[in-house]
Structures are given as structure tokens and as C-alpha cells.
Amino acid sequence: MSGYFDHIDPIKFEGAESENDLAFKYYDAKKKVMGKTMEDHLRVAACYWHTFCWDGFDVFGGGTFNRPWHGGQNDQAAAEAKLDAAFDFFDRLGQPFFCFHDVDIMAAAETPKEHVESLAKIIDKVEAKIEKHGTKLLWGTANNFSHPRYMAGAATNPNPDVAAFAALQVRECMNATHRLGGSGYVLWGGREGYDTILNTNVGQEMEQLGRFLTMAVEHKHKIGFKGDIWIEPKPHEPTKHQYDRDVGTVYGFLKQYGLENEVGVNIEPNHATLAGNSFEHEVEMANAFGIFGSIDFNRGDPQNGWDTDQFPNDLRETTTAMYYILKGGGFKNGGSNFDAKVRRQSNDAADLFHGHIGGMDLLARALMNAAAMIEKDRLQAFKDERYAGWRSGLGAKMLSGEASLDEVADHALSENTSPAPVSGRQEMLENYITNAVK
Ligand code: XUL
Ligand code: CO
């Protein structure tokens, strides 16, 4: 018991009529939706870095949160105090999963040796916490972007010794994730890109990244880790250009290195919008390529162009995305990680609960809305009808590869008819969504 959250009673489901700000209005863990509990559908996780590590600093000022484990040295005692507080928070929220970077949970380390020792020291404690409290690890990841050694990239660094340090972090963190029973392992290439093309050998850097990822996949098989590996696409920030810019780009990259059946994606809405895509576009692209893995739920701010990582609150967007997530088969090893942080002025312990409660209630509503949409599935019915021509005759022959360009062209010539344009019914379909959002 950390003491820091002692004044917050465990968060309970009280229903939509409740006026208790520290209660769930919609997230009812054991409620069944499409034959499965909400908890099992959503697999909600809190992230360690924003919720427990970030102290509220920004480029214009220092930390505002003053949590008991902030401010001093990031030593083993601070790491353990943070761990106590984290699992106390998970208990009070009823959080089934969490996610971490290696450096989030361990005492600060500088050399490779110190890194390995420091991580090993805290992993023993994390293992005991998971056993005692029951909150499970969704995924782990190595922070290969914060330390100055990574300023020119990790796997894509011009210096192979830096890539070797990154490999050490990935090996140790993947081993830890495996040991802790995690169901996924994430690689976000924060600095796997460039600030200026003038000093960058793009082709070689991508080759380095492809090799690095292949080694990570080989290691997964070597240690018998049965979880998934996911890349988390993001177009830029911190670098001007990142090689993992969006789902489509990542798929091309995976294909290039023969990893498309080994690695999936962890999609983040704020990254999608930074790339000029919508969240649901990224989900549907991942479904189309068969690489959908997990979600880092959050939102950006339409008035500015960076990764504000706010808790999600757009029910229409989340309902639409959830519809496509469910249509793709839902989460398997993945889940709903809140890669989200409360605002700098939200400096009370209670604010962490408000953020997570709001996010979980939003996902619960989106899940129920999406399930209701699927029950009738007017979108699917409309699309089935719209593409019906491709299921038989000429369309089916073209798709299966049976027809040559000559045959198809001659068909057009012999029929000699101009196909009439058919309405796409966009407004009608948008009305379906408007009416489904409850
Ligand atoms: C950064 C981001 C990361 C990854 C994990 O934008 O989303 O926190 O989720 O490294
Ligand atoms: Co993220």
C-alpha cells in the first residue's frame, strides 16, 4: 500500500444515472456483449510512462505533479515506491492490464551492465506484484529513444555500437516480458528516422532496421515467447520523418524483410491523425493486411499538430473504430492501452482516476454501440450489395486471375455499354453512425 491513493475508494460500476465522478457509468467489467465480457473484449491497460513516470514537465516548465516518487533520484527505492503506487492504482481502478518501457520501471542506469542489473532487480518485484494483485502485463517495450545515445536513432544509428546497446535493451525487455507473462512486445521507432536527409543514408538505415527487427523476431522464437510483436506506427515527432510512418508504410516494410506474418501493428489514434489518416482508416488497413494487433488509445487536439496524448473522448470516432476492430475479430493478444496523460494542471491523484474512468466508460459505450451496429450490420449489407458484381461472372474471373487484360477489354468492347454511375450513399451511411452513437 503506497498511501498516495488511500483517499480514493475502489472504483465501482454505478450505472449511467450515477453522479459520482469516481464511478464507472458504462464500464461494467462482467457485463456480456456479443457473448463475451466487456473486460475480455476491451483488455484495458494503463501505461506506466504517462501515469506514473511523467511529472508534468513541459518545454516551458518543470514538473507539477509532485508525486512522492518524483523529484529525487531515480534509484531502486524510487522505482519500488512507484511500483507500489502503480499496483495500488490498478487495484482501485480494477485495471486488468498494464504496459511499460524498461526504463519506466527500473532505477536509472548508464552502462550496459548497470542496465541489465537494474532491470533484473525490479523485474523480480514486478513478478511478485503481478502474482499478488492479479493485474497482468499486456505488453512491454524497450525505450530506445530517450537517452542521448539514441539521438541519431537506435537500430538506424550510424554507429553499430549504439544499435548493439539497443539490441541489449530489446533482448532484456523481451525476456522480461516473456517471464512476466505479457501477451505482446512493442517496438516504437521514435528515432528510427531522420531530422535531415542531408546527413542520412536512407536505404542503409532501413536495411539496418529490417535486420534489427528480424533479429528481434528470431529471439522471440528462440526463447519461446508466444505473444505477438507489434510495431507502433508514427509519422514524426521526435524525428522529422520516421520509417514507421503509418500502417501502410509498416506493411510495405514488413513485406520487404519477409516479416509480414511475424509482426503486427499497435495503432495509436493520435499517431494516425499526425500522419493525416483517421483512426478507423488505420484499423481497417491493418485488418486488410492481416496485421491488426493492439491499440494505444488516446486523442490529439485538432487545433495543434503534435502528439498531445490526451485521454480519448470522441464517442463517434471510437464507436466507428470499435466497429472495425470487432469486424476484424476483436483483440486477441492485444488490448486497449491508454497511452494517454492527464493535463499538466490536473495535478491531483484523483485526476489520474478521472482520465482512466472516462477512457474506460468511452470504450464501454463504443463497444456496446459497435455490437448493436453489428447485430443489424447495415454497413456490411450495403457493402455486400455494392461489390456484388465481383462475386460472380467477370468480376470473379478478374479477381481470381483467370481473366487476362485482353479478355476483360474484349468483354467491355463486346458488351458495348456504359455502366451507369451508382450513388455511394455517403450521407445515408453517416446517418447510420450518428444514430448508432448512444
Ligand atoms: C510515443 C508512443 C510511445 C509508444 C511506446 O508517441 O506512443 O509511448 O507507445 O514506446
Ligand atoms: Co503509444
Image (cartoon, grey):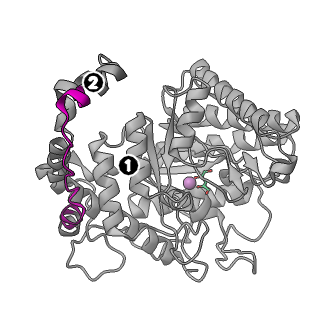
Image coords of residue 284 (percent x, y): 38, 46
Locate residue 110 relative to residue 34 in the image: left or right. right
Q: Quadrant of the C terminus?
A: bottom left
Mark 1 neighbour density, 10 Å: few (under 14) some (14–19) many (20 or more): many
Image coords of residue 325 (percent x, y): 33, 47
Locate residue 112 relative to residue 366 in the image: left or right. right
Direction left: furthest residue: 376
Identify which residue is drawn at 20% across, 56% down: 423
Mark 2 neighbour density, 10 Å: few (under 14) some (14–19) many (20 or more): few
Q: Which of the four quarters of the rendered structure image does ligand 1 lie in?
A: bottom right
Residue underneath mark 1: 43
Image quadrant where residue 79 sits = bottom right
Identify which residue is drawn at 40% across, 33% down: 290
In this view of the protein, can residue 138 be seen by the observer?
no
> Considering depth in this image, is 193 or 59 the residue closer to the camera?
193
Image coords of residue 120 (percent x, y): 70, 39
Q: What residue range appears in magenta? A: 411-432
Residue underneath mark 2: 410
Secondary element under disc 2, as helix, strand or loop, is: helix
Label 2 with label 1: CB-CB less than 8 Å: no
- Mark 2 C-beta closer than 8 Å to ligand 2: no
Secondary element under disc 1, as helix, strand or loop, is: loop
Which is more foreground, mark 2 or mark 1?
Answer: 2
Locate residue 369 relative to residue 297 in the image: left or right. left
**Disc number placed over residue 422 in the picture, else none:** none
Locate residue 361 relative to residue 374 in the image: left or right. right
In this view of the protein, can residue 405 be seen by the observer?
yes
Q: CA distance from mark 2 to mark 1?
A: 53 Å
Point out the tag, 2 or 1, that comes first from the N-terminus: 1
The amino acid beneath tag 2 is: Asp
| Magenta stretch: includes residue 231 | no
> Considering depth in this image, is 349 or 80 the residue closer to the camera?
349
